Amino acid sequence: MIKDFEKEYHRYKAMGLKAIAQVPDARLTEAAGPDGNSIAVLVQHISGNLASRFTDFMTSDGEKPWRNRDSEFEAVPRTRAELEAMWGNGFAILEDELDRLTDADPGHQVHIRGEAWTVHGALARSLAHLSCHVGQIVLLARILCTGDWKWITIPKGKSEDFNRHLGKE
């Protein structure tokens, strides 16, 4: 069961990186509108969220006192290398904690902002949150990409080709 979560987290981590890689450096901080988030802001938020939720996941509240969530949404100039390091750090904390979990843990209780969750529920919540924001990153990346977009998932009009070759790679 935990391996299923690990696989999905890894898939979204890779999807985000593949999308970000297609965006020119100068456009990583562009937002789609005055109240929109840029890819850089979304990376800051995802990284902060993963660090907070998964540092001492089983023993402390997932909303850490040291986290400043509001600052994650501030437009701070960041280089690609800084964003990649933030992304990697957040996921490293998550992956270290997932490595500690066993299939006996999903029914145990953890807390997020004082609310009790099962480990399974907290992981499902976190994965849903991550997938939402990675989807935003992919959409922004497609808008901001200045070259030919390299499809991360099945390209439009290519479902039959994909299904025909499924499992042959």
Image (spheres, rainbow, N blue to C red):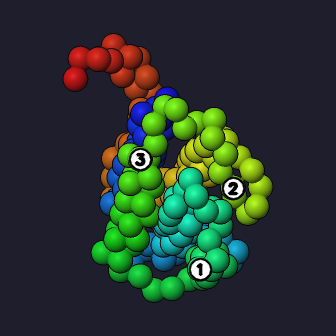
The label shown at residue 66 is: 1
* Helix, strand or loop at mark 2: strand
What is the three-letter code of the residue carrying label 3?
Arg
The label shown at residue 100 is: 3
Q: Is residue 46 above or below residue 163?
A: below
- Across and down, in percent, residue 108 comes to 63, 41
Q: Is residue 71 visible?
A: yes
- Across and down, in percent, residue 163 comes to 38, 16
Q: CA distance from mark 3 to mark 2?
A: 17 Å
Label whose residue precedes the other's in the sequence (3 or 2): 3
* Helix, strand or loop at mark 3: helix
Front residue of 149 and 120? 120
Label whose residue precedes the other's in the sequence (2 or 1): 1
What is the three-letter code of the residue carrying label 2?
His
What is the three-letter code of the residue carrying label 1?
Trp
Residue plotted at (58% across, 58% down): 59
Q: CA distance from mark 2 to mark 1?
A: 16 Å
Q: CA distance from mark 1 to mark 3?
A: 23 Å
